[in-house]
Image (tube, rainbow, N blue to C red):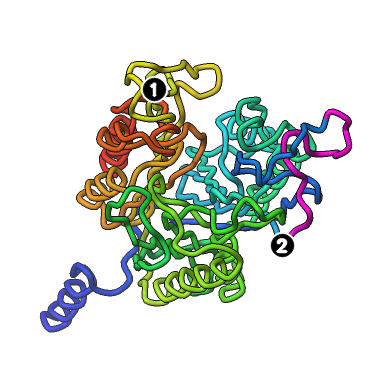
Amino acid sequence: MRRVLAVAFALLAVALRPGTGESAPSGPPLLAGARAVDVTPPTGVPLAGYGGMGRRLLVPDLLNRHPYAFWFKPSRGVHDPIVARALVLQSGPRRVLWIAVDLIGPDGEMVAELKERLAAIGLQYDAVVLAASHTHSGPGGFSRSRLFGFLALDSLVPAVRERILRGMTEAASEADRAKVPARVGVGRGEVRDVIRSRVGLPLDPEVGVLKVLRTDGRPIALLWNYAIHGTLLGKQNLLLSGDVTGAASQELERALSVPVLYTNGAVGDVSPALRGWPGVRRTADALAREVLATWRRTPVERESALRAVSDRLHLPPPRLSLRNCLGRWLPSGLTVGMGWGFPSEAEMVGVAVGDSAWVTVPGELQTRLGQAVKAEGRRLFGHAFIVGISNDYAGYFLTPEEYARPSYIACASLYGEAGGQLVAARATDILKKLREER
């Protein structure tokens, strides 16, 4: 009997030893689903992103010759589709929706309307991230802002806005219905030779990858992150296109046969190194190759907790600095109020999944500020990423030094020399809140 008891206790000790065998998960299982929906508008919709004469009509379309264009030339066709891709993550009651879409940028009103449409069909989330790729060859005509319409998007075309919103809603609802038990892995790579600095400072070459798999190892989705402007196709291009990040995502989708969501990084001072259609192909190949290599070498976490934080960013009154736009010869205090055209507050979202944290920025953050946020995030998590041009668009956010130097990006930075630091500080606060929820 003593021998039997001794054997029983030995087996029990082995069973209870930490790290031995497959112990029960400590939290609710992670569920994930993803879908992609083509939201390409009709040919003739103007392209968004460039406000110069290369894309403008010489005379606005006062005679209604073009069904979808007023300020800008109508598009002449479709080179590659405009796509809305959705990823839903759920762990117990916590639910997060990612939407990645081939647009120049979102606006807060569009995010609010998307949430309303989803709530009307019974879909509510702790956080919604609407991330634009920032392609400058995507459709215009989707924003109600008259300022952005005149500057870069053209006047509102209700049918275009409806197509995009309906497509995003469809992608989200189908992704939600497709949820299955899942595991994730997070990895990082580097691509250095496809970007250049607008201000002569070091850039961030990091590629971030969120790998989402079924528990049997089959892919569900890939979410990737890299800071690059979608301006390889210049203002002469009049074909609808996702530009370089659309091309890279499509290449990855052919390799993995699942939706591939792209999110931009801290892109305020980043330009592509190559241009034109050959540049798109070469840059997309380099990015897709590194993303796929990172996917393949990234291990999958055994358990992945999900957390989300949504917060309001309160900004100073937006003002256009004439000195930053026209030159140093003007006094620094000469400004024009822009509160009628730009937001005074915006939503920022933080999402932590597994050992990674992702924080949104409602505009284009300078690299140096983005790297400071990521460094703090990695003190709290294994991986941290900036998701730029998400949930709203409030222009550029720069360091005080770069704001003081007249340039295109300083002209488009409307919240003063402390605006960039304010956004970076709020992003860091959100990362800390995510860590506390852990």
Write down the residue under mark 2: 79
Please tell me whether residue 78 belongs to the stretch shown in magenta: yes
Please tell me whether residue 296 belongs to the stretch shown in magenta: no
Alpha carbon of mark 1 to alpha carbon of mark 2: how far?
39 Å
Give the answer, above or below, for where 140 lies relative to 341: below
Q: Out of 428 and 329, give the one closest to the viewer.
A: 329
User: Which circle marks residue 225 in the picture?
Assistant: none
Name the image quarter holding residue 428. top left
Write down the residue under mark 1: 314
| Left or right of 323 on screen, residue 173 | right
The magenta-colored residue range is 62-79
Q: Amino acid at mark 1?
A: His
Q: Residue at x 42, y 65 (%)?
A: 194
* Residue 216 coordinates in the image, percent (x, y): 50, 74
Q: In what quadrant of the picture does the C terminus appear? A: top left
Give the answer, above or below, for where 166 lies relative to 314: below
Mark earlier in primary sequence (1, 2)? 2
* Residue 371 coordinates in the image, percent (x, y): 27, 49
* Residue 257 coordinates in the image, percent (x, y): 61, 72
Q: Is residue 307 visible?
A: no
Name the image quarter holding residue 165. top right
Q: Residue at x 54, y 43 (%)?
A: 130
